[in-house]
Image (cartoon, grey):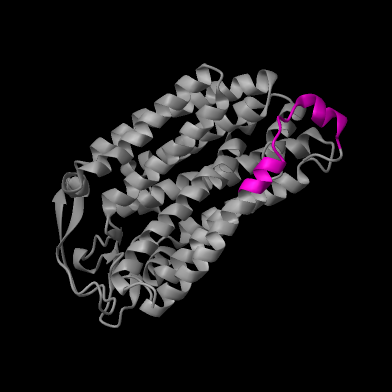
Amino acid sequence: MIFDYETLKLIWWLLIGVLLIGFAVTDGMDMGVAILLRLVGKTDVERRTVINTIGAHWDGNQVWFITAGGALFAAWPMVYAAAFSGFYFAMMLVLFALFFRPLGFDYRSKIDSPRWRNNWDWGLFAGSFIPALVFGVAFGNLLLGVPYHIDDLLRVSYQGSFFALLNPFAIVVGLVSVLMLVGHAGMWLQLRTDAEVAKRSAQYGQYALMAFIVLFALAGVWVSQIDGYKIVSMGDTQGFANPLGKTVTQAPGAWLDNYTKMPLTILFPALAFVMAALAIVLSKLQKPAMALAASSLMLAGVILTAGMSMFPFVMPSSNNPNISLTMWDAVSSHMTLNVMFIVAVIFVPLILIYTTWCYVKMWRKVTISEIENNTHGSY
């Protein structure tokens, strides 16, 4: 074995966080671009310009989403089982919405019909807005606790409903998710387009980031008031993963305890706020490359804040806090985590290398004249 069981559990918590950051920065950006499509593109050629800024990358960026889902299934199988049974209708809604993205990108410009292209524009919007919103809503519900039960045979049964997920707090978190991706996409489009499209992209990106700062702060205040979860006693973290072997209690503001215990972690929410504000300033100063880097760090700050607030919980139970799933007791076997770690060490750097290579080789501004001169070779 390369590492002991406890160390591997922590490593995989960090790796899944890295994959989620990669997903937000890349595929999340694509979602934001599609959400902005009809706002920054007033004509068909302008919308094609917007689409072609991600045309070379959108399918490759989805590798992060697929890898994160696969890692979740392999590293935390009980979380995967509980989440996909509890959030079944929400996940199906996301799946069907995602169908519109590849179809929209590939088929939108095949027919020179305003009605055809307009319908696909709305399809791309729905296929990006719905997943971005649902992912945030799902995380909001994790902070509130999910109504599920685990019996003595470790069988998970969900006891909630789809509409119960749509509570005010979760919707606020969902809007935070949408706004951070839209703001990030605005910086990307300001960098990759020109003329009026770049100007509108910067404007809407700045508006989205301003709204993000307000709602992220509101969500933080709200979290300080809701009942968080904390472990009173825990079984052997080196032993067999058993979610029934601990004692958990709830207390108002408990989700903020980690920031008191580990003061340096306050840098994570600070990173989100500071980088969002910096991206706005850099965008106004016509420095879109630096603004894009700042918005990327903002996304990392948000995800790190979410992870650190809940640590070590992954999926708390509102029915019985003692059975809440944590990174210590909802994991696969020691051997599985070891084998997966070796695979991750090999393939995650490869993903980073080829993703970077693709962006470098295909880097350019996409202009309206380019689309007009290459009608059949562009999206």
Q: Is residue 229 visible?
A: yes
Viewer-closest of 207 and 344: 344
Q: How many marks?
A: 0
Q: x, y (%) of residue 338?
A: 42, 74
Q: x, y (%) of residue 206?
A: 49, 24
Location of residue 36 with respect to 4 vertically, above or below: above
Q: Is residue 157 left or right of residue 35?
A: left
- The quadrant the C terminus occupies is top right
- The majority secondary structure of the magenta stretch comes to helix
Whether the magenta-drawn stretch holds residue 368 is answered as yes
Q: Is residue 300 left or right of residue 223?
A: right
Q: Which residue appears at 50% of the width and 65% of the height? A: 344
Name, please, the residue furthest toward the front. 2
Q: Which residues are magenta?
A: 356-375
Q: Is residue 308 left or right of residue 104?
A: left
Location of residue 263 with respect to 154 vertically, above or below: above
Whether the magenta-drawn stretch holds residue 80 is answered as no
Viewer-closest of 96 and 298: 298
Q: Quadrant of residue 2?
A: bottom left
- The quadrant the N terminus occupies is bottom left
Q: Quadrant of residue 47?
A: top right
Q: Which residue appears at 64% of the width and 42% of the height? A: 124
Q: x, y (%) of residue 166?
A: 38, 47
Viewer-closest of 335 and 228: 335
